Amino acid sequence: MKKTILALCLGAMAAGAAAQTIPNGELYKFRATQNPIVTHKHTADPAPFVKGDTLYLFTGVDHAGNQGGYTMYEWALFTTTDMMNWTEHKSPLHIDEFKWANSRNAYAAHVAEKDGKYYFYVSTNWCGIGVAVGDSPYGPFKDALGKPMLTNADCPGTDHSWACIDPAIYQDDEGNAWIYWGNRRCYVAKLKPNMIEIDGEVMDITPEGANFTEAPWVHKRDDKYYLTFAQGWPEKLGYAVSDSPTGPFQYKGIFSEVAGNSNTTHPGIVEFGGKTLLFTHNGALHTGTSYSRSVCAQELTYDKAGNINKCDITTDGVPYLDAYYTRKAMKEKAARKMEKKMGAYLMVYHKDADHGLHMAISYDGHEFIALNEDKPLIAGDTIAMQKGIRDPHIFRGPDGAFYLAMTDLHVFGVRDGYRTTEWERDGKKYGWGNNRGLVLMKSTDLKHWTRTNLNFQNLGGKWDEVGCVWAPETCYDEEKGKLFLHFTTRFGNGRNMIYYVYMNDDFTQMEGEPKLLFEAPEGKYNVIDSDIMYHDGTYHLYYVSHEGGATVKHATAADIKGPYTMDENYYDGVRQGHEAPNCWKRIGEDTWVVMHDNYHIHPHNFGFTETSDFIHYTPTGNFGDGKMTRVGFSEQKHGAVIHITKKEAKMLEKIWNKK
């Protein structure tokens, strides 16, 4: 039977959570076997944040003892991947960073991430709400403004000195960021894209009928926005629901009773490991009081109508995630969440006529319309060492950024006056189309791009004799939390095979030397043009086999790095003259499309095959002779498709389809 924390609030310190000091003095390792989670110090005002497979728990730090008020000077950071094994990191932020905060009170905070930057929003009692910025969730964080971002003057309808506290951030599906705060009244304002300034009016969204006190937190489930908060005194947790992040919010009632041995409570709600988790605090440690609190966690559930079920904090706390926490659940949850935001498709491809980057847009996944009248959006001679690109691939990372990877090669360099020889290097030694580099680009908005040119001969060793680096593609290794770049390569004029390498987050440098990912049995024939799709616990590798003529084939593995098992189920209807497979999902459907470059016909075209289970495949024809159509372009080569939002599609059309 579960016991409430209130019954144990004066009991012994929770068992099994003794800290172990790490030699550098900056980290502590501990295990949490029950609530409270942290028992070697007092923590309050939890602000959980999830990135990849890691939960970052930011908290305030209470002094121990029987002081008569809140003594708080810094914030703490703890991380976990399973809710049992925790690491405490060096304090990421101290109140002294905010020179204007004369109160010296490090009250409730919230951390948000945007475009690779982390923003630490803090309350300082009567001095207002400030914001610090850093390049990592671990800090260091620096005051971004040198003054408060919000003060009591931004809290209409209140006149007490601590009205401007408890910031919380919610970022909606359109990329807008909203900040919530308040005591006695609840406020919201939109943030500017820089995340450090208010954009527009402050709105009072205090739910009618709620005895709102403080600590607002907003999360979304299905199409509803949930505003949770502390209400009354001593505080309980209540909630309200709206169809909009700015309300109006309809009050629904109390879902968690008074926290044991503490007048205050403070919700923080995130999805992690396939569960919805509620974090708050109480005074349950043997040295606990209302001013020496401890962070706890509990699983949050809903009824069929979407109402929050009763969720009182218990000693048992959250079921340990190592019992059900799997990479599969995390990947599928993230994929579903991302797909719900999408409403269009973006295709990239190249053409032999210009060796530049082309794009097309689709809103239904069947009709693709060329951008820029089928002229290059980026000219190959402006970005590539060999003055041309081929084999473009685009990937949308878990960070929301876009990653373009392209072969650095101009096949018709002599024709277009870029060189006097057929190939850049000796054709007898390096073979057809020899090249040694890739073009990598990254963007957060599909408008502004950074670029890196990789020359693999710079790696030295066997890479001095690299014969080609073709058809690069980017995906993400959830296990390592790293960008995973795979490509076709060979040495000299030998057999082609698939290699991979991890990339840094900026997509500018390889992390280590590339390694073999996949090759033909005993290396007897060429394999080229790899494409990897993850689904239902399996990595699906589509590739081109030259075993008896170029044809697309399929292999599977449980790990992105393999080993891959060849599968003969895939069949595109022809099995000849096909290359450059690219697998993409139809939005809102359990249908995957394998698109391929159909070069055995003239003019060049793309062919399509569909599956719902990665076992049975149905060829659906080429562009123009089946369910797939193209408008404004032809003779495209080696394409790739990703999901984008309708807003992003409209933005691209506005930029590139000007008459």
Image: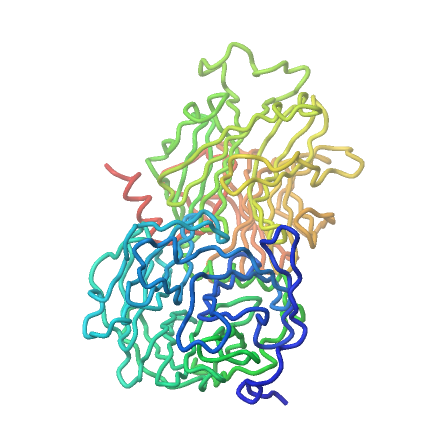
Q: Can you tell which quarter of the image residue 614 is in?
A: bottom right
- Give the left or right position of residue 76, taking residue 205 as reference: right
Residue 347, quarter of picture:
top left
Q: Where is residue 120 in the image (x, y as percent from the top left)?
A: 40, 57
Which residue is more in the foreground, 354 or 171?
171
Figure disc tally: 0
The quarter of the image holding the C terminus is top left
Q: Quadrant of the N terminus?
A: bottom right
The location of residue 433, given as percent across then percent down, is 59, 22
Percent across and percent down for residue 334 are 52, 60
Measuring 35% from the left and 49% from the top, which residue is drawn there?
Answer: 648
Residue at x-position 64% and y-position 61%: 29
Q: Colour scheme used in the picture?
A: rainbow
Residue 490 place in picture, x, y as percent = 68, 28
Examine the rendering and report whether any part of residue 301 can be seen.
no
Residue at the top extreme of this rendering: 420
Which residue is at 38% across, 53% downward? Answer: 97
Q: Describe residue 465's horizontal placement relative to residue 79 as left or right.
A: right
Residue 481 appearing in the image = yes
Q: Is residue 603 left or right of residue 1?
A: left
Is 110 located above or below residue 257 in the figure?
above
Residue placed at 29% from the left, 40% from the top? 655
Q: State the residue in front, 232 or 439.
A: 232
Residue 507 sits above or below residue 278 on the image: above
Residue 284 vs residue 584, the one in the foreground: 284
Q: Please, which residue is most extreme toward the right here?
A: 522
